Amino acid sequence: MQTLLTHIKQLLQVRDTPIHKVSGAEMANLPLLENAYLLLENDVIMDYGKMENAPSLEGMNVVDCSGKIVLPSFCDSHTHIVYAGNRSGEFVDRINGLSYEEIANRGGGILNSAKKLNETSEEEIYEQSKKRLEEVISQGTGAVEIKSGYGLTVEGELKMLRVIKRLKENYPVAIKATFLGAHAFPMEYKENHQAYIDLIISEMLPAIAKENLADYIDAFLETGYFSVEETIQIMEAGKKYGLTPKIHVNQFTAIGGIKACVDHGALSVDHLELVTEDDIEALKNSDCIPVALPSCSYFISIPYTPARQLLNAGLPLALASDFNPGTTPSGNMHFVVATACIKMKMTPEEAINAATINGAYAMDLSDTHGSITRGKKANFILTKPLHSYYEIPYCFATNLIESVWLEGKKFGTQI
């Protein structure tokens, strides 16, 4: 089955030569074609070019895209979509002046979500989570990483990862699973951290590996959560089971965590609202990509990742949503891109690169997702009529999407 999109006003992120990521000054370049066509065959991109060179329309499913823009679907490399209930009460607590740390110390935060999750059936968690997944797909996401981390027990973590596996089996979207048992210390382990780490290493990891439930391993490396030394234990244990580290770090404090992540082979370091010169030096000449989560900064009123500092140092940067019940109850990557431009002073080109090709890199999906490249998955967004792609971040709260295409079909026709 061939489909031909014609008269595309602007076809964005066109990469004739496949690349894995873009860094530094390169991020300001977003290659595009004006008045273009895009040819799909089954679930892959077959060809593209200027309309004057378009193939014959005979026998094809033709979609007229006059006035509209096509760009690769967003690649959201950091989410917590699988959870039970919500934490809207904590939203009001923050309005009334409580900090993230104060809420956590009262038994809220991650421990609140863990309690709800362990009280909820796997089937109900799946039903809640699939609605969130369908929502983010409709908002333009075509590849997504989903973390566990609200179980904090052997069965709770397995339950979450089984739900992620089921979502992956049932939806035409690329999904990567991350084991985040080291999200917080349960109350019974507050005074005995090593006992909980031993539980992760000796019981959780073998059970996860037995069912092949995860691609990555994560930890909340932060003051009051997992120390550098504790996180190193977890990273090294995960690697023995083939799980590459992707680590939460530098959200509130800088304690040398980024260097430890780089030294131990992390694919990404996520949050980085606080960055030191030592952190930047550690990231230079590494394969580890920083991931910024601007809608988290927006929602809980903390600093934004210093994008200009990172890009001026020649580093790559990805953008992700951090969709979770406590600090970012939204997976809208359009809003993420807009917020990166408005609050982090990224250009539209930099932000779109960060949310597409660099997001794909942060999930090991650069070979199949993140750009308009021959042979890649036909996952893309078709916008409503626009004057320019600048309107994507400019119209930060307007739904600009006409349709989302996954594996060569409009979303909604595959399920």
Image (tube, rainbow, N blue to C red):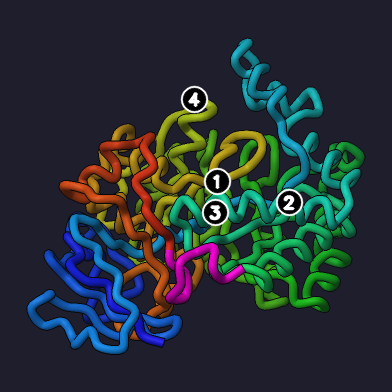
Above-or-below relation of 406 to 94: below
In primary-sequence order, the first of circles 3 and 1 is: 3
Side (left or right) of 44 relative to 190: left
Q: CA distance from mark 4 to mark 2?
A: 23 Å
Label 3 amino acid? His
Side (left or right) of 274 relative to 326: left
- Residue at image location 40% in from the left, 82% down from the top: 44
Tag 2 secondary structure:
loop
How crowded pointer 1 is (Cα within 10 Å; few <14, some 14-19, many 20+) is rated as many
Q: CA distance from mark 3 to mark 2?
A: 13 Å
Q: Which disc number belongs to residue 149?
A: 2
Q: Mark 1 and mark 3 in contact (Cβ < 8 Å)?
A: yes
Do we see residue 195 in this rendering?
no
Label 1 amino acid? Asp
Magenta residues, start to end? 405-415
**Residue assigned mark 1:** 322
Label 4 amino acid? Ser
Number of marks present in the image shown: 4
**Residue assigned mark 3:** 78
**Residue assigned mark 4:** 301
Assess whether residue 335 is covered by the magenta stretch: no
In primary-sequence order, the first of circles 1 and 2 is: 2
In primary-sequence order, the first of circles 3 and 2 is: 3
- Residue at image location 35% in from the left, 55% down from the top: 354
How crowded pointer 4 is (Cα within 10 Å; few <14, some 14-19, many 20+) is rated as few
Tag 1 secondary structure:
loop
Res. 274 image quadrant: top left
How crowded pointer 2 is (Cα within 10 Å; few <14, some 14-19, many 20+) is rated as many
Q: Mark 3 and mark 4 in contact (Cβ < 8 Å)?
A: no
Label 2 amino acid? Gly
Assess whether residue 407 is covered by the magenta stretch: yes
Question: Residue at the top extreme?
Answer: 96
